[in-house]
Amino acid sequence: MKKQALLVGINDYNGVNDLQGCINDVTNVRSVLKTFFGLENTDIRVLTDSRATKVNILSRLEKMVKNAATGDYLIFHFSGHGSQIRDREGDELTDHMDELICPCDMNWDDGFITDDMVSEILQQLKKGVRMEILLDSCHSGTGTRDIRPFLTADQFQDNPVHYRYLKPPADIECRHLGDEETLKPSKSFRTNKEITLNHILWAGCKDNQTSADALIDGNYNGAFSYYFCKHVRESSGNISRADLHTRVKNSLKFNHFNQVPQLECKEALRSENIFK
């Protein structure tokens, strides 16, 4: 069995609020994978900041999936901004809200990665290949009340918590005012059956919440990624997904983070150890 990982972290965005904890998330997850799960440097591909473009993320993800053989284990971790927009095709409403992860070259025309794009790649997985996905970003259509205004560098340093959600601009939001009653429920990263039935998916928060980019122990980190790695280390990597989910959820609550991490997978996989 071969293990492969693609880790993406973006602090430096083009034209939108920067973040501060995403590179630390990548190095934290990379350290855990090497220390406890046997991955070597050559098994882990890292994309950060200017290299984490839409094209690079999708091409690296697709290459990892296509090259995997039966029995292999794949890991994809994304740390950065997330968002959500109404999905339309042509002149008619389609069926859902599109969940987005935002590359470094994010723009509101076509410079984002939707759940559909990820799903299309994952459908290429061969039988017997397992994949674990960690998303430390926001997937909230109602979380804009928590969004801070654009901050200057000095103001950013004075605020210990920021949110990994990009609010769509007014023209994108107005395009869909009044559509809510005619839209079917959101498919999203977490409710897409092709993903949840055959893969393990972790998300840093619920659909109606934001994921924190927070100052923890003197350094900025994604709160979800930080406590995820913390409890993996404390257990030396020998921890079930269900136990890890409970511990991360409790740590976030105890430390006053208003986000509840989500774990989506087959029930039998919940009792199995992480990355095994």
Image: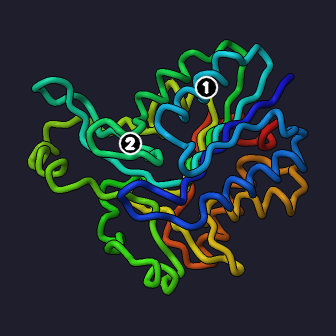
Q: Give the number of the disc on residue 41.
A: none
Residue in the picture at 64% in, 16% down: 66
- In the rendering, at what x and y percent does residue 148 appear? 35, 74
Amino acid type at circle 1 is: Asn
Amino acid type at circle 2 is: Glu
- In the rendering, at what x and y percent does residue 82 appear? 43, 51
Please tell me whether residue 74 is drawn above or below residue 215 in the rendered image: above
Task: Determine whether, in the image, residue 214 is placed left or right of residue 149.
Answer: right
The residue under label 1 is 198
The residue under label 2 is 99
Distance from disc 1 to disc 2, alpha carbons, whole Å, reads 19 Å
Task: Determine whether, in the image, residue 262 is placed left or right of residue 87.
Answer: right
Please tell me whether residue 61 is drawn above or below residue 136 in the rendered image: above
Instruction: Answer few, some or many: residues within 10 Å of disc 2's Cα (few below 14, many 20 plus, some between 14 and 19).
Output: many
Q: Is residue 262 visible?
A: no
- In the rendering, at what x and y percent does residue 30 appear? 77, 49
Image quarter where the N terminus lies is top right
Q: Are marks 1 and 2 in contact (CB under 8 Å)?
A: no
Helix, strand or loop at mark 2? strand
Helix, strand or loop at mark 1? loop
Residue in the picture at 53% in, 61% down: 260
Residue in the picture at 57% in, 15% down: 124
Q: Earlier in the sequence, mark 1 or mark 2?
A: 2
Instruction: Answer few, some or many: residues within 10 Å of disc 1's Cα (few below 14, many 20 plus, some between 14 and 19).
Output: many
> Coloring scheme of the render?
rainbow
Task: Determine whether, in the image, residue 144 is placed left or right of residue 249.
Answer: left
Image quarter where the C terminus lies is top right
